[in-house]
Structures are given as structure tokens and as C-alpha cells.
Amino acid sequence: MKYSAVLSCIIALAGLAAGHVSIISPCPRYSPVGENCPALPAGESLDIAEKAINGPISSVQLGGTMPLCRHTTPYATPSATWTAGQSVTIKFNPSAAIHSGGNCEFSMSYDNGKTFAVIHRELRYCFLGSKPASLTNTATILSYTFNLPADLPSSDKAVFAWSWVNASGNREFYMNCADVAIKGGSSKSYTGPQMVVANYPGYPTIPEFNGNYETGMEHYTGAKNITVSPSGGSQPPASPNPPYATATAPVSSAPPVASPTLAYSTRPMPASYSVPAASPTPAYSTRAMPASYSAPVSSAPPVASPTYAAGNGNGNIPHEAKTGGSGSCSPGAMQCSGAGFIVCVGGAWSQTYSCGGGTACKSAGSGIYCGYP
């Protein structure tokens, strides 16, 4: 049995402290906003409210982590069936706060998310297409169409992943995974760049871009190649992503030197972590967005951030349930309700969720966010 529920939550701290994006097609694991989603695995629940699929799986400043893919138990049936060498379209939730763009990768795994090889990239200006004139949370691109590699192996249990490192705000890492079937593959394995993991325990921290969209680009241009296949991925390297420096100067466009096939580490995640001393993360400002990137960035320690509705990765987000709106509504609609917010699910308004941390719901264009009064 398929379900198609719609839940849209855009909550950000002081407008830019917490962005929200998720894919809706193909349907990622446990998504309440996905299209043509398979039935949930036994004992699992939709990724809503405290967990909020639009939120990051890790935040350097706010702490908390979720596993890569967010959820490790796959759907019993695929969300989509694709043909190797043919085009696919990846669609994003229109209720999105996009943190001034950043780096998106689209990757494939054949071992349930232990190893990922990149099949497509949208670097620097993901969701925007070009460098923005100033900080922004508004997307201009909400879908990407590209051709699958012809040499993707066929499998009924492949895992497609979208991952994103945001350009502005807290240093976060976003990732959704969809279970897909691949048909018509011309090879038994696929080799591509290793998926970059950053702002996540045990991996490099990529600082805020502050207008310089070459920030952290060395992690992408220098990514090692890995080979993935239904028979198993390649051996893990001695360390995660290569230990490149986090210099912000433009990186050479010359192709990287060929590297041996490697996969990222799958060692257990620590319960918490701190920013590596070798690459401190600049503090972000919770002031109103500047007119351009020339505004100075505060060097003071980050202001304590309130809890945000997307969750801190461990599902422990207190919220007060109140009476929601009345009457019918259009699925995907959202609005403030007092100091909290409500969303339209299946044509009916949800309960009211409080923002928490002394923040209140505010409107921002087509979205809403929790900001300080």
C-alpha cells in the first residue's frame, strides 16, 4: 500500500540558523512529504515533528547526530525504478530554507548505505544556479534532471542519496536516502568520486562560505574514487575524507590526480563531538541579514541557539501540543498559530507546535520560521 502525505515545516533560528530541505521524489525513507512512498517497515514511523525530515543529520554548533541516510532500515519495496543511462528528475520539498546554497551531491550505494559513489553534483550554488547577491533562504531551483551513468549495475536494492553542505548559517550536513531499483545496467560495478561527508563527527568541518563559494571545494575536487557494486563496496581508507586544509582561496580547476579506490570509514559514531581545533568554525551572526557579503562577520563565540523544530538529531525536542487550526486546508500549507506553527496534513490542520527556546513563529515570504521576538 502506498501513501502520499504532505507535511511542510520551515523553521529557522533567527532566519538563518537552521535551514530545511528534503527530497520528495524519489520518496526518501520514512518521508511524510514524499511522492509515491512505499509502506513503512514494521515498527517504524514517519519522520515528522521532533525528527523532521527537512532537518540536518548533524550540526557542529547544535550537536546531535543521526546515522547517514537518517534511517538505516530500507523500505521493503523500492520508491522508484530507474534505467541505467536514462534521465531521472530529483524533486525537492517546495517548503525549503536553503542557507544561501552550497554543495549538493547525488550518490549511489549497493550495500545499504555503507559506501556511496557520486553520480551527479551541483556544487557551490545548489538550489540557486548562480552566486546570490546576498544571504538568502529562498530557492530558485527545486528539481534537478540528469542522466544516470550507463554502467550502474542492475539491482532491486540500490540506495540513492542526496547530500548537502550549506553555504551559510550553522555548519550542518543534510542527507536523504531513497531505496530504488536499477534496471538495464551495463556493468557489474560503478566507480565514481567518494561522497563528501562534512560537518559530521569524525569528518572535516567546512566553514561558512561568507561569499567565497570556493570554501571547502578541495574536499570535492580531491575526492578519491570508490567502486560500488551489488557484491559489495571497496575497502575503507585509513581515515575519512582526505585531510585537506580548509583554505578559502580559489582552488585550481585542474583534475585531481588519480587515486586508488577507497571508501569512507563506517566506524561507530561518537555520541557527541567538538569542532576540530585545526579548523575552527567561524561564529555566525544572528543579526538581520546584511545587504551584501561585505558585512563583517562577528568573531565572538556563537550565541546560544534555541531548540528548533527540525530536531537535534536525537529526537528529544520538547514541544507543547495545542489545538490547531480548524476547517479544511490545502496539503502542504503552513501558517503561524499564536507563537507556534501548524501545517496541513492530508487536508486538515495539525496540532500547534511551539517554537521553543524563547522564539516565536514569523512569516518569511512563502515560508515560516522561528525567530527571536
Image (spheres, rainbow, N blue to C red):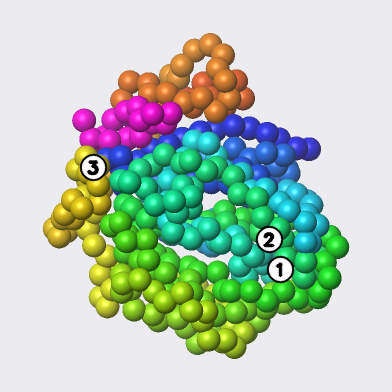
Q: Which residues make up the magenta segment?
A: 356-373
Q: Give the farthest residue toward the top.
A: 327
Disc 1 marks a residue whose amino acid type is: Tyr
**Residue 211, horizontal then vertical, whole percent:** 30, 56
116 inside magenta stretch? no
**Residue 343, horizontal then vertical, whole percent:** 49, 27
Q: Is residue 284 above or below residue 273?
A: above
**Residue 54, horizontal then vertical, whole percent:** 49, 44
Q: Nearer the viewer, residue 135 or 70?
A: 135
Q: Are marks 2 and 1 in contact (CB under 8 Å)?
A: yes
> Disc 1 vs disc 3: which is toward the camera?
3
Mark 1 and mark 3 lie on one chain; the one further toward the N terminus is 1
The local crowd at label 3, few if under 14, some if 14 to 19, many if 20 or more residues have their Cα within 10 Å, is: few
Which quarter of the image is occupied by the C terminus?
top left
The local crowd at label 2, few if under 14, some if 14 to 19, many if 20 or more residues have their Cα within 10 Å, is: many
- Where, by quadrant of the figure, is residue 152 drawn? bottom right
Separation of residues labelled 1 and 3 (CA atoms)? 45 Å
Circle number at residue 110: 1
Query: In what element is the residue under mark 1?
Result: loop
Please give the name of the residue rendered at 55% of the width and 42% of the height, measured from the top-left corner: 142
Separation of residues labelled 2 and 3 (CA atoms)? 41 Å
Label 3 sits on residue: 291
Q: Nearer the viewer, residue 330 or 136?
A: 136
Circle number at residue 159: 2
Please give the name of the residue rendered at 39% of the width and 80% of the height, measured from the top-left corner: 244
363 inside magenta stretch? yes
Residue 54 can be seen in this image: no
Which quarter of the image is occupied by the N terminus?
top right
Mark 2 and mark 3 lie on one chain; the one further toward the N terminus is 2
